[in-house]
Amino acid sequence: MKPRIHVTAIVMAVAAATAAMSLATHAWVGLASAGTPQDSLTVEEAVRLALASHPAVAQAEQGVAAAQARIGSTSSARYPDVAVAGSYTRIGPVPDITFAGHAFELAPANNYDVHIGLRQTVYDFGRTNTAVDLARAASETAEDNVEQVKWALAYRTIAVFNSILILRENVAVLDDQISALKEHLEESRKKVQAGTATDFDVLTTQVRTAAATNDRIEAASNLEAQEIALRELVGWPSDAPVKLAGDFAKTEQTLDGPALLAAAFGQRPEMIVARDAEMTAALQVRLASLGDRPSVGLTLASGFTTGYPDNLNQLKANYAAGFDFRVPVFNGNRTQNQRREAEAGLHAAEARTDDLKRQITADVDQAVARARATWDKTENAEVLVKQAEEAVAMAKTKYAAGVVTNLDLLDAQTSLTQAKLGYLRSLYAYSISLVEIDRATGKRVW
């Protein structure tokens, strides 16, 4: 007797694929839909819903808003700093002098001062401009981070969507097997009653039916888990029905390794963010190097104050204007250390980019190799299904004629189920390998 059918292998393959990859959108066909729980949802619409509603995207977009606000706050150093200030001071005793028998107060007892002051940095050797450039670089990084979040979320959504489709295919195959086993069981019971078969035939069929039922329960459980995950991604309520539109499409793709690698270096989200990090680090080095540069500023003030000799208690209009400058002489080597720190950060960013290039090269090469291998397996698995179908047809004819035993027919049916599951597994693996290529090259799928 051959071992009973297990779907554990294909379930594990689906789970692993869901965590890391998905079927490419071009590998599925289906009608467009409005994307509501009542419609048949396409993979494209599922991605659109996830990107429109998922909190991870909103969180990343708020990072962009914060970065843009930081540009404005940094740019404020280019504008004058204007403030209105006022004060009141009561002093005593009031200073005075006596001259010719008369006492003259040198200051009022009540001192009032109100003025508007302005300070404008005239020149700081590029520190402000560099700080603004650094803020702009941070904003660009935040925007690229949004794209990276969307990219990861889109592929995760496609993975869950397509896992549901493959698991539903598994359940359908197992349903067919169980239905065939039940029909065979009824036929075996009739043969026992007619005396042309034994109870062993019935018992063997019952064992195979129970095993197939357990496999279906396992596949259905995994299917339910993936449906829950899809509802979470697209923002549906927990009781919403999951109706999907899509199917497998067996189409061989032409693969150009060097072209795919060049595309990956240009559009992979991690590479874009890594280049942003290099640019930011270079600006930080430049800003740190300006720490010892002097700065020149203009100050203006105008207002009203008391204390003028002709009338100490009268508020009089006044103004003040001047230039100030600051030349750092010694700051405990802070600037040098800050520059060294920034340069280390730049070297680390460059090393990170080089590391990513190696990883991306390996990702693309491995994806291309898997795609070519899985295509060959798919071709072979398709042939096996046709051969298994012919074997079952022959076994049924021979069993009806009493030429083969019950076990022979069961083994033929088992082999057909295995062949169908194997074909689904290989077709799924090939489709995943295509999306691995899309993912490895950073293809935008929304």
Image (cartoon, rainbow, N blue to C red):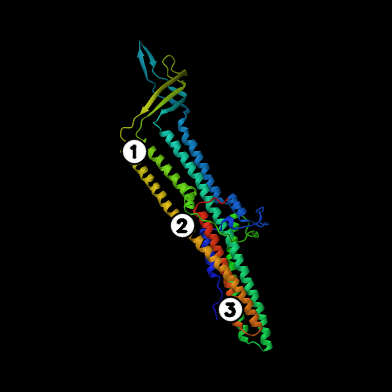
Q: Is residue 218 in view? A: no
291 and 368: which is toward the camera: 368
Instruction: Find numbered disc 3 in the image and state the secondary structure of the residue it sits on.
Output: helix
User: From mark 2 to mark 1, how far is it between C-alphas?
Assistant: 45 Å
Q: Of the residues under marks 2 and 3, which one precedes in the sequence? A: 2
Residue depicted at 49% across the width and 49% down the height: 263
Q: Where is residue 370 in the image (x, y as percent from the top left)?
A: 49, 61
Residue 411: numbered disc = 3
Q: In which quarter of the image is the N terminus?
A: bottom right
178 and 73: which is toward the camera: 178
Q: What residue type is labelled 3?
A: Asp
Q: What residue type is labelled 1?
A: Thr
Q: Residues within 10 Å of mark 2 (few under 14, many from 20)?
A: some
Task: Check contact, mark 2 vs mark 1: CB within 8 A.
Answer: no
Q: Position of residue 256 (x, y in %)?
A: 50, 54
Instruction: Please give the residue where the numbered disc 1 appears in the rendered image.
Output: 335
260 and 304: which is toward the camera: 260
Residue 365: numbered disc = 2
In this view, 178 is above or below 62: below
Q: How many labels does the image show?
A: 3
Residue depicted at 38% across the width and 49% down the height: 351
Point out the frontmost of discs 1 and 3.
3
Residue depicted at 47% across the width and 34% down the height: 75
Point out the frontmost of discs 2 and 1.
2
